[in-house]
Structures are given as C-alpha cells and as structure tokens.
Image (tube, rainbow, N blue to C red):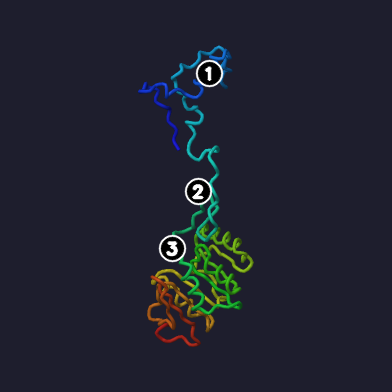
Amino acid sequence: MAYHPQDSSPRAGGVATMTAGAVIAGLLGACGVAPEPQAGTAAGDTAMPPQATVPIPPSRAAEPAGSSSDPPLSAAPLGFDQTSLSPQDKPRPERTPDVVYVPTPQPVVDAMLEIADVGADDVVYDLGSGDGRIPITAARRWGTRGVGVEIHPLRIREANLAAHRAGVAGQVTFIEADLFEIDLSSATVVTLYLLPDLNLKLRPRLLRLAPGTRIVTHNYHMGDWTPERQRVIGDSVIYAWTVPERIPPHLR
C-alpha cells in the first residue's frame, strides 16, 4: 500500500483534525505536567501547533513494495510447472529447440501411458521430455523405469526436481541431448509430443527398434504408418503403434 503525507490545509471543523498527540499534550498541560519529548525530538525543540498533522516517517514512506517489513509471501505450491531457479540462473540450450515447449496435460499423459499398456518391466523413453511428467507419472503409477531426453537444460533441472519431489528419482533419468542422436535401443515404450515433420524424421529410427516396442504420440501422426489405436482426450488425439516384426515396404 502506498503512503501519502496528509493534507495540512485548514478544513471546516478544524478541531476534529487535531492529532491524538496534540490532544494528550493539551490535557497534560492543563494538569501542569510537561509532556515528554517524542522519540527523535531533542529537548527544547519547538512544539507542534495543535492542528498540525504528523507526517509519515520518511523511512516508511520510501520503502518499496515487498521490503523486509512486509509479511512474507506464502510458498508456491509444488508441481510440474514450478521451479526453484532464480531469474539470473536460467541456462540456455546449445541450439534452438525444434519445437516450442508446451506441457502435455496430465489427463493426456495418463491416457498415453494407458494406451501403451506400460508395466513395471518397461523402459519408457520420452523424447522432448520437458518437465519430465511422462516418465515420472509412469514410475509413480506403474513402477516403470524412464528416460527423458530434453535439449533445454532448464527443463532438465525442473524434471530432476519434480522426480525428487515425487520420490522416483531412482527410477528415472533425464538426459540433456539431441533426441535425434540419442541411443533408443533399450526402450520398450517411446512417447512423443513433437510435430508431424519431426515424427517422420524419427520414424526410420523408431522402426528399427525391437519388434513389440510401443510408440505413442500426442496429436501428431506418422504419415502413412497407420496407427493401431487412437484415443481422443478433450482437444487432444493420442496415436499408438507397435514396431512390427517385418517392416512393410512402403515404410522402409
């Protein structure tokens, strides 16, 4: 709240503008008692006129909002979209990411993992893992192991923090790397929320994974690789494939 010095100009009913200090001083004087000097006022200083108003102390009036005298703000709730990093400590990726970071809504995360039929024996690779919510959710709900691949170091920090808070830091790993260069050979489930051209760029590598590996995407398809299953969640569409034993000629 801003503080403003009071207007000392005369008003009708001037007696009502007397300050509490002036009234007390007058009563003490009537009783023959000399008032004690106020803090910060030397003995012998000229007394305030009865109708003068007390100015706001400069030290308080000059304080900016959020100073140490203000009550502390309550801590922000913990969640995937929170970070403890200060504005001065925001590392940057080595190159511009291929997509703008947009977190997958949690109901879509749940549905992606359900349609992939994940279990405790799976290893979930999330390419472009952002704050890590897909591997973390899989570890919490199904006990899976997970690997998140993310190019932005700030997202990696957020994901590690979220994994620690969720109690699954020992089950998930987050790697700062280019998703087009990472080794995917240990994946049994791969999740994506990229763009159609990036999905197509990744498709040859995904088709080389072990037969039975499940691929799940949020919103975007794989060209003429027809999905086996799909599900609509609100405004989102989830597509799912399984790497076949034999790759059809049109996908080679």
Which quadrant is the C terminus positioned in? Answer: bottom left
Per the model, the C-alpha gap separating discs 2 and 3 is 20 Å
Image coordinates of residue 151 in percent, x first then y, are 50, 62
Give the mark toward the camera: 3 or 1. Answer: 1
**Which residue in the rendered view is the most extreme toward the right?**
170
Residue, disc 3: 102
- In the image, 42 versus 110, the foreground residue is 42
Q: Mark 2 points at which residue?
A: 87
In the picture of the structure, the residue carrying the numbered disc 1 is 27
- Front-most of 100 and 144? 144
User: SS of the residue at dot 2?
Assistant: loop
Quarter of the image with the N terminus in it: top left
**What is the CA distance from the residue labelled 3 to the residue labelled 1?**
70 Å
- Mark 1 or 2: in front is 1
Quarter holding residue 8: top left
Which of the numbered marks, if any, corresponds to residue 222?
Answer: none
Amino acid under disc 1? Leu
- Lower sequence index among marks 2 and 3: 2
Q: Which residue does the image show at 54% across and 56% down from the upper left?
A: 77
Residue 84 visible to an observer of this rendering: yes
Disc 2 crowd, CA 10 A, few/some/many (<14, 14-19, 20+):
few
Residue 123 percent coordinates (x, y)? 58, 75
* Place of residue 71 in the rendered image (x, y in percent of width and height, measured from the top left): 54, 42
